[in-house]
Amino acid sequence: MPDLLIELFSEEIPARMQARAGADLKKLVTDGLVEAGLTYGSAQAFTTPRRLALTVEGLSTESPTVTEERKGPRVDAPEKALAGFLRATGLTKEQLEARDDKKGQVWFAKMTKEGRPAAEITGEVLEATIRAFPWPKSMRWGAGTLRWVRPLHSVLCILSDEAGAEVVPMEIEGIAAGNTTCGHRFLAPDAFSVTGFDDYVAGLKRANVILDPAERAETIWHDATNMAFAQGLELVEDKGLLAEVAGLVEWPVVLMGDIAEDFLGLPPEVLKTSMKEHQKFFSVRNPKTGRIEKFVTVANMVTEDDGATILAGNQKVLFARLSDAKFFWENDLRVAQKEQMAPWLASLDNVTFHNKLGSQKARIDRIAALSKEIAPLVGADPEAAEKAAQVAKADLSSEMVYEFPELQGIMGRYYAEAAGLPADVAAAAEEHYSPLGPSDDVPTAPVSVAVALADKLDTLTGFWAIDEKPTGSKDPFALRRAALGVIRLVRDNSAVLELETVLHGAFFACFKDIVQNRVAHAEHEIEDLSDSNAKQVAADNLAAFDIDWELVDRKEYINEGELKDLLSFFHDRLKVHLRDEGIRHDVIDACLAMPGNDDLLLLVKRAEALADFLKSEDGENLLQGFKRANNILTQAEEADGVSYEYGPDRKFSETDEERALFDALDQAEGAISSAIETEDFASPMASMASLRAPIDAFFEAVQVNTDNQIVRRNRLNLLHRIRETCLKAADLTRIEG
């Protein structure tokens, strides 16, 4: 079986498009080959800035011959039906065969599709792939109609086996497939021929091209870390930048340069971000001081002066970039130190957060009030939490964050420190955005936790209040991430937070701002009216929104349905979160059905305890005993039309097993109730486990539906007691199995 090698050689492909392009090339070609009847062993795609390459091993030499029979119309069917069948099959009437069928004679067509050689199929598939390639952006050049990400220069396409290699016949827009490629643009630009994939990789390496992007990345990381280590420094890890730089060079040459003394006092995050965003430089840190002191750049060229000229040019450009960063930093520091960030906070009143929810300043005021309310619940000082929330987003108006938005929060911490604010307030400016994802660190400082919770809860209630909820896969405001952030903050910090109470206040604050925002818009519209009568009518209508918010009953302005819907959204996110830890959905449902389900920490504790209990042998057996008791009781209540909820009387017990169950229930009920009050859910599970043996023994020895009606009712009441005792810990009726 031959191996296939394809290379599409062009001008530079943007690094951000390369990985996707390699995957698309592999999928389009292999899918096309399989659809045409060929099989293959394995396939792998590679990318460099100037080429997409695909190797397919173990390709079949030709597609199989396929014979197909198709049933047509009856022999006596109208001529139009027969003509349509002939067009569909491509046959003539003489080539059809009449056969007996249930409804008489029917025409049958027998069609044979001859197999075709792999080279012919490959040429067709490759041409179709090139013409339909899904580049995010593409261009045309010259007089042709072909579109590609950058001008396409050549196509290499060969099939090789032990006998040698053959060029696949294919031509597109004047570019004929061949068996040659070119190496590095400057270091080895001459063309060379290849006979197979191994020869291709080796030839490229001789021509100063490393084909595999993973190998290029490894080379960059290895050389850069060694270079830094040799000077007692360490390279700052950045996997995203490493992947991007590996897509910018075909022959990576690592160079280390100095950062001018003028800029070493800038915050490390500023240096790192400026060098990464503008120059694609890696930061090199002094492990003793934490300062960024040098940078690493990756050239695509070997020079006679060992990169000195390249470094000199890079350092010149870097000096200009860092001069800008230093200017922003010094200006921002003056505002923070002399004016306590007041101008920034004032300017946020003119920055719209959302056209229905008002300005960033209005949002900050809501978060500050909510932070103060939440603070005692997480062990934070209310005044400190309120102050932290008021300044946490001030850096959004700073020059540095305007230039580098990804530094929001980080710069807020620096500016809060420069303003002389307490350390916990400054830390909250950075930490309140966290956690940003499932693997992000969760803040633990009480003030940071309070502001982080308030920030996320305000986001959720605000967008719920204006009916901008996630739908399907769409979540433009990252509300699922915000809900998961609340869950992780509560769980990791063991915060007892009754969500329903907190959400009431948050919903009311959002509703108040929504109304005030509408009023402000309406007032502007009234001013623009030229008709005095219309203006008066509009003003009279607007008077209905003149509300004294201090006196209103909050409940009148809160949509309880929306609040419950948001709480349900939290429960759905919690299910996903706990399922990732192996807790079954029915276990979570059993806990959600219990009182206090707006306390996320309580829910998690209950679910973990129940999940562990059900994994044990006692748990499995008790569940079966509970279900048996519940089923017998439910059937009896439906048949008799009564509820057996009255306390069973021990004096009507006829067996030792009944009396033993009475004793076990007496002991378990008290233990379960007292443990649940202290939110110790492991103990109720242990108490329920003690019921396993007496319940099993009861069902082995006792017939519940006995002929003696007094004894029967007593036993059914005893089953009700089993049900109620077990349901104190969790709603076991929701457990499957």
Image (cartoon, rainbow, N blue to C red):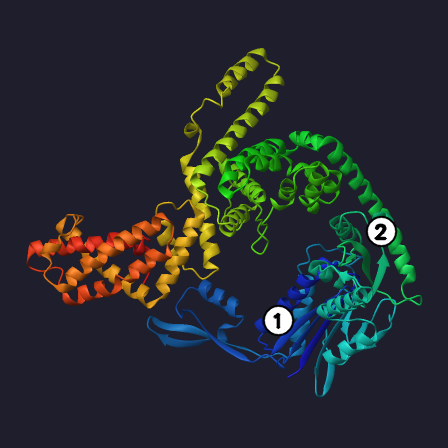
Residue at 62% across, 76% down: 42
The percent position of residue 645, horizontal first and vertical second, equals 18, 48
Residue at the extreme top: 532
What amino acid is found at the position of numbered circle 2 in the picture? Leu
Query: Which is more foreground, mark 2 or mark 1?
Result: 2
Considering depth in this image, is 664 or 141 the residue closer to the camera? 664
Considering depth in this image, is 257 or 164 the residue closer to the camera? 257
The percent position of residue 70, horizontal first and vertical second, equals 46, 72
Residue at 58% across, 52% down: 437
User: 500 left or right of 391?
Assistant: left
Per the model, the C-alpha gap separating discs 2 and 1 is 45 Å
Mark 1 — residue? 30
* For marks 2 and 1 on the same chain, the one whose residue lies earlier in the sequence: 1
What amino acid is found at the position of numbered circle 1 in the picture? Thr
Image: 546 above or below 304: above
Residue at 39% across, 62% down: 612
